[in-house]
Image (tube, rainbow, N blue to C red):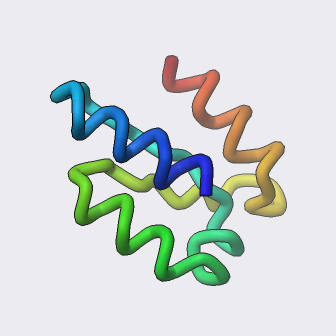
Amino acid sequence: QHGVATATMCALFGLPCTVYMGATDVERQAPNVFRMKLLGAEVKAVTSGAGTLKDAMNEAMRDW
């Protein structure tokens, strides 16, 4: 849900949006991933480690 809200606000203000999600969560939350992509967000599936939220956060910090 947070990814969809973030993607919505980024679309509203014309900002780029990249959402990092664990690979398991991407599969489990396919409808939300679809919505984020419709709103123009780039969704990155994180496969490092166990592919969990913690791993997705670490990957986002590494890219930042």
Furthest-left residue in this view: 14
Relative to residue 53, is residue 21 drawn left or right? left
Residue 52 image offset from top left, x and y in percent: 79, 58
Identify whether 29 is placed above or below 43: below
Residue 58 image offset from top left, x and y in percent: 72, 33
Identify whether 30 is placed above or below 41: below
Residue 60 image offset from top left, x and y in percent: 59, 32
Image-quadrant location for residue 33? bottom left
Choose between 25 and 48: the one closer to the eye.
25
The structure residue drawn at horizontal position 51% and vertical position 17%, both measured from the top left corner, is: 64
Relative to residue 14, is residue 44 drawn left or right? right
Relative to residue 30, is residue 37 drawn left or right? left
Total labels drawn: 0
Image-quadrant location for residue 61? top right
Relative to residue 47, is residue 4 drawn left or right? left
Furthest-top residue in this view: 64
Choose between 30 and 55: the one closer to the eye.
30
Query: Considering the image in quadrants, where does the N terminus appear?
Result: bottom right
Choose between 28 and 24: the one closer to the eye.
28
The structure residue drawn at horizontal position 38% and vertical position 45%, both measured from the top left corner, is: 7
Choose between 44 and 38: the one closer to the eye.
38
The structure residue drawn at horizontal position 70% and vertical position 74%, both measured from the top left corner, is: 24
The structure residue drawn at horizontal position 66% and vertical position 82%, both measured from the top left corner, is: 28
